[in-house]
Image (cartoon, coloured by chain):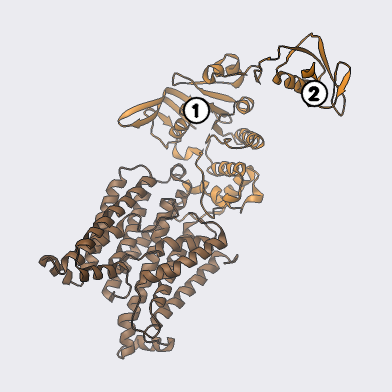
Amino acid sequence: MGNSSPALKFVGLFLLMILLFWADVGLGSTNIALREIFAELFYKNSTVGEIIWNFRLPKATTCLLAGAALAAGGLLMQTLFRNALAGPDVLGLSSGASLMVGFVLMLGQTSIAFLALVSSNPWSQVIAASLGGVLVFVLIIAIARFVQDNTSLLIIGLMISAATSSMVAMLQFVSKAEDLQTFIIWSMGSVGSTNWQEVKILAFVVLIGIGIAVSQIKPLNALLLGESYARSLGINISSSRLWIVVSTSLLAGSVTAFCGPIAFVGLAVPHLVRLAVPTANHKILLPLAAMAGASMLLLCDVFAHLPNRTQVLPINVITSLIGAPLVIWMIIRNKKVSV
Amino acid sequence: MISAQQLSVGFRARRKEHILFDNLDLHLTPGELVCFMGSNGVGKSTLLKTLAGLLPPLAGKVNAHNKDVALVLTDKITATNMTVYDLVSFGRYPYLDWRISLSPSNIEIIEDAIRQVHLESLRNRKLNELSDGQLQLVMIAKALAQQTPVILLDEPTAHLDLNNRVEVMNLLRSLSRKLGKSILVTTHELDLALQTADLIWLATANKKIKTGIPEDLVLDGAFDEVFQFKGFDLKTGKIEHEAHRKKEVQLLGTGYSFLWTKNALERSGYRVVEKAETQITVFGESKTLWELNGSQFESLATLLAAISQE
């Protein structure tokens, strides 16, 4: 990406994000021109206006928020654990969410009367996912108070993921075929099922998460030197660790609640940003990662719409399919990847 | 300034206290370079971290403020994209708020720290492009940028070659003099410590620290007690060689060439004495030559080969 200054990359990435947002609104089973989009934004009584306001805009905004949240969360986890393989899901939050959603979808709909009642509520998946995420989060925070170092916390997060995943597998094993399919589709992620009310809640939580992350930029930078050095520079490690975990939980948890477990963006985007912009300063890395994550998910959503078809591919299928070659190409070009 | 009273250092594991140092009274003087020596695993790093406030003491107390002590540890720094300048600027972190914006005076302090360790030309180099010796100098610059009266360094010369070891120790000594800092260095480099330290802290077997100037500790045998040298004579500074050839040689000559010839002979198992039948003469101005039984040799290797034929 040349030797242009970070400021230029900032502007470039911002313009790219706007461009992809417009593309995501404009492209789909019906293609809408930019002029038309602007016209319909103010006279929303035609069919096209309906499509833009009720489907395309909430979906594109969800992509924007979810992409930014996941990439920022991934950056936080990679720095906290100084581990290139960490992502926003290492704490086990999305596994916890999966487990709860699994309970509602796979046991509820056709077997148990009470849960069937719950799952008929349109908010049931969101509430179940949030509940699962929060339960794992409380567990992680409780454990974090007793473990001394970040590596132990990482391993505990992975163990919680493993345990909940096996419970999900158990649920899948005993569930009925049609319930299983509903769950599998949920687990493939979706950005298109949110309404404005949900988008507002997502935006609120994501902004709080990003705000906390911004307040932790100094400790994040210092953590790159390791915990001992960070402490010798006057950083309060245990409180910073808590806030970083809280921020990531809000970011990853809210996205999983509304969109399902979206893979890859949180792991890959921070690496792409570090490879493209030679800096170790989170003051620059954090906003760039958020914008790059938003752009990435918007791009994936554009590709998820097959041309001239009403069918939409699940977002997880696309994120890895586009993301993996991109990361491989960047690594080959730059020879090395680490935190 | 830093001092400690009745300090006990160690760690707690499974509700049991493991005391490494007991009831210490310590203090560091401005402008002095102190080398802290002791056998492996005696707890040098633990004491260093306790003095720096990273570990709680088991008993007693350390009198130092958080902003009084700068640390250089053995932890390897692997951060991608981090430059020399970035790392040195971490030294200003204790003085910055969450926005971490560097004021002109902060920038001047960082530049000055980089100048002190002579790394101006490497300012924008990434850390993974530096040698181990350069990396150690960057860490020292970071410590200088913290502008603390005390700098504690854990094995700053480990993994460095002789040249870099000498450079680091000389730099530390001149910094302690020039800037009036108290510098404490843990090290295994006995020879280097003896020649550069103003004061030695020696970890003894009874969980205490013996302090003294290097020469006193050599002469009163304190080092021999702690390190239990095997085949090394500290008072002559030499490795002991067994005169396994049971042959005595008389050596005539002066200066360096005399000393190195003596070294070669002793290493090869000959005893060099005042008077013996076999006589070797070292001579020559620009090029050293050796004479044995009337024949001349141009190198020590050929000379040694000739003696062994006798």
Label placed on residue B257: 2
Residue A224, horizontal then vertical, whole percent: 47, 50
Mark 2: which secondary structure? helix
Amino acid under label 1? Asn
Sequence-wise, which precedes: disc 2 or disc 1?
1
Labelled pair 2, 1 in contact (Cβ < 8 Å): no
Residue B296 found in image quarter: top right
Residue A128, horizontal then vertical, whole percent: 22, 63
Give the left or right position of residue B72, taking residue A75 as reference.
right
Residue A220, horizontal then vertical, whole percent: 43, 53
Residue A219, horizontal then vertical, whole percent: 43, 51
Chain with colour orange in the figure = B
In the rendered structure, the colour chosen for chain A is: brown
How far apart marks 2 and 1 lie (CA) works out to 37 Å
Q: Which residue is mark 1?
A: B40
Give the left or right position of residue A322, taking residue A44 as reference.
right
* Rendered view: A192 above or below B190: below
- Residue at position x 79%, y 20% in the image: B258
* Rendered view: A146 above or below B218: below
